[in-house]
Amino acid sequence: TSISFEHTTSASRRGDIPCPDKSPLLKGPVGVNFEGAEKNDSNWPPTFEEIAAAYPTLENGGYYPGPNDCRTENTVAIIIPFRDREEHLRFFLYYIHGILQRQQARYRIFVVEQDDDQVFNKGQLMNTGFIYAHNDTRFHPKCFFFHDVDTVSEDDRTLYRCRGGNEVLHLSHRIDKFNYRFCCGMTVGGVIGMTNEQFQKLNGFSNAYYGWGAEDDDINARIVWIGRFSIYRPPDDYIRFKMIRHENDKKNPKNNERVALLNSWNKRQSKDGLNSLQSTITSVVEYPTHTRILVKPKPK
Ligand code: UDH
């Protein structure tokens, strides 16, 4: 008897023909609508069950193995720092799965949730999510998007596809909050795409920022001065992101040390990041719509 070890699902789904450079499934404007929630409409955003039902080809953990009829090289891990934003996450998942599937990506959604009541540490969550996603056994993502949960693309032509080489991709440079203008000393916050090689060269995010502010400016400095990368912001008019309005997070107060930390970013960079991460993963749950990684950052 011969035993075949071939993984039939993924093999047949991938197809033999490479996917076209421009997906024929793109629709353009997505019609992002957060309004129901603002009016306390209990049917909106959809529940996790409804989102799973809307995307029946998802595999466990919010993994999409790519389109049936062509083979895609665009392997994407979406990494979302998270705590106490359940409603935002439902909006986010509802839209992002449609966008990425129409872009013919092969992807998985990782929600990295801080599993304690201490001050939020976005950098440690990002680094933990990166390492976990990088070791994924189902697919080996080449491209990593670090993505705020409250920021949603309004057009599926805005491609979640890393630039690679010398260019880091900052996608969310036009958001409704700032009238879709690049402004106000904005650095690389919101949605940023890097290859595995690029992120490792930077030593990831700093782990040192507890609370709100400046961790984005820190990675911006790493991108420019350590990576010597340029930051590519696609110029197309359709690039637009909508942010969900919300109150300040109680457990993410403004970090009073943020300016001092940022001023000394260069001294810490080589020993503060992926190579010094001391967070603990307390559990990993694979939901139909996403993988939830529960993390305790290193206490301050
Ligand atoms: N996040 C959470 N929970 C929190 C805090 C942050 O999930 O309690 C995540 C979430 O993905 C969010 C991202 O981290 O989109 C960035 O959070 P942020 O607070 O830096 O940015 P945001 O634009 O809020 O969401 C701006 C509010 C300004 C607060 C001013 C300080 N008091």
Image: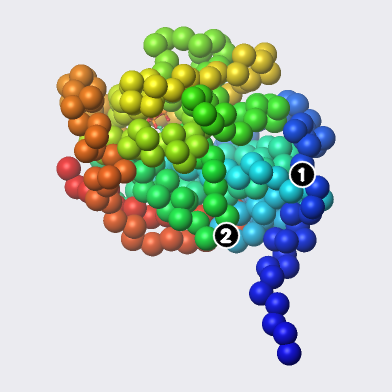
> Where residue 183 sits: x, y (%)?
46, 9
> Where residue 23 sits: x, y (%)?
77, 35
Question: How far, Cα to Cα, is label 1 from label 2?
Answer: 20 Å
The quarter of the image that holds ligand 1 is top left
> Where residue 197 sits: x, y (%)?
45, 38
Mark 1 lies within 8 Å of ligand 1 (Cβ measured): no
| Quadrant position of residue 59 | bottom right
Mark 1 nearby-residue class (10 Å; few <14, some 14–19, many ≥20): few
Q: Check disc 2 and give the amino acid type.
A: Arg
Give left or right: position of 25 versus 111: right
> What colour-coding does the image apply?
rainbow
Q: Check disc 1 and give the amino acid type.
A: Pro
| Quadrant position of residue 162 | top right
Closest to the observer: 155 or 236?
Answer: 236
Closest to the observer: 256 or 284?
Answer: 284
Disc 2: which residue: 138
Give left or right: position of 123 versus 1: left
Residue at image coords 73%, 61%: 11
Sequence order check, earlier mark of 1 and 2: 1
For the C terminus, the image quarter is top left
Which secondary structure lies at badge 1? loop
Disc 1: which residue: 18
* 91 in relation to 221, above or below: below
